[in-house]
Amino acid sequence: MFSFFRKEKSEDLMAFLKEGQPDVGQGPAYAPAKPKMEETGIEVVEAVGGLAPEFEEAAVMYANGRIGETATVLNRYLLDYPKSRDPLPWFMLFDLYEVTNQRDPFEDAAVDFAVKFERSPPTWHPCGPAAKPSQAAALMAYSETYGSMERVKHPKFFQDAANAPYVRLDVSKVQTPDAETAKAILDDILRLNEMKKPVELIGGAGFTVRMDSARHQADRLSEAAWFLLLAMLQLMGKESDFENVAVDYAVAFEVSPPSYTPPLPLPVHAIDAKQVENNDALYRLAGAIGPGTDMQIRELKQFAQGKTQVEVNMSAVTRIDFAVVGLLLELLIELSQKGVQVTFTEGNELVNTLLQIVGVNQFATIQPRPRV
């Protein structure tokens, strides 16, 4: 399933997927749109082993905002495989043209689609209005070791943090930190705590798993790394895990165990009344969801509290940025562990394919939009 990532060596997300996910077994599967032959005359031929590499490539390019290259990959596929009866690349191309408001190319492709499949093509239906952008958060992304890059970014990050409602720390690239790296990240957390800034972690689940594994091996964690692990667990609100590690720390260093302090609450916008006016399990995502404008993902977490089923309508989503798809996956893992069944509906095929590639279909169901 991850052939494209292996080709492109996207180690960051792969590390998160391998080490950040619990072993929960096989989950819901992606259900691609498969029109019945008697109704449409389309014969769907699935690629052996999953998606064609070109489809994966197009989805990831689009997630990274490379619109022109995405269209090129899809058009090249249609030219290279003229006998293919798979409608997926066509639907991906139609969705791309709609969300980027390219009506003329859409109409040209629609004519070719009608000729090839001998049926009426999709009609122009641009994506609905985008959601109002959320107030941006300050973001600090750490490399595997704390070095010159982080020091260069420091002044701008803390300047942004002073005016931001909360900050985000991305530790998805950090493996088991050495003493210097652990102390530097811990110092940042302490400074943010003094500023009374709520902190959201990206890749926190995988990072704490790696550190927790290392602490059971002799001399693998410095004292600063132990404190960093405790700080991470505290920021994630995992009091029970914090207490267990704190006791082990006290035994290892022959000191009193540190005390747990609840993390500062992250700001959450009031959920629009329209979200629940007709269906109390329906949540709507909208617009381009990316770094600094991904408040909707955290709102989804709040919305899912106390529910066993949630439908996430994505008819108005234009794009999910590659930089935040890991955050969404992390949330879905958490909801799955709590027994919440999440279904994504009516998303465009580029977004659906991205979700399938990163493994969202292990923790949620993806239902594509109906095609007439």
Image: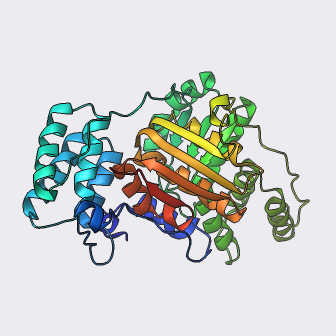
Does residue 181 show up? yes
In the image, taking residue 321 as reference, residue 360 lies left or right, namely right
Residue at the outermost front position? 38
Residue 91 percent location from the top left of the image = 27, 51
Image quadrant assignment for residue 20 = bottom right
Q: Residue at x 19, y 39 (%)?
A: 106
**75 or 138, which lies in front?**
75
Query: Which quarter of the rendered picture does the N terminus lie within?
Result: bottom left
Residue at the outermost right position? 256
In the image, taking residue 152 as reference, residue 203 lies left or right, namely right
**314 or 227, which lies in front?**
314
Q: Residue at x 8, y 57 (%)?
A: 79
Image quadrant assignment for residue 22 = bottom right
Q: Residue at x 41, y 48 (%)?
A: 322
Does residue 179 show up? no
Query: Up-down: is 181 above or below 319?
Result: below
**196 or 346, which lies in front?**
346
Query: Up-down: is 303 above or below 25?
Result: above
Q: Residue at x 28, y 34 (%)?
A: 100
Residue 239 percent location from the top left of the image = 83, 56
Residue 190 percent location from the top left of the image = 71, 40
Residue 125 percent location from the top left of the image = 32, 35
In the image, taking residue 47 as reference, residue 14 lies left or right, namely right
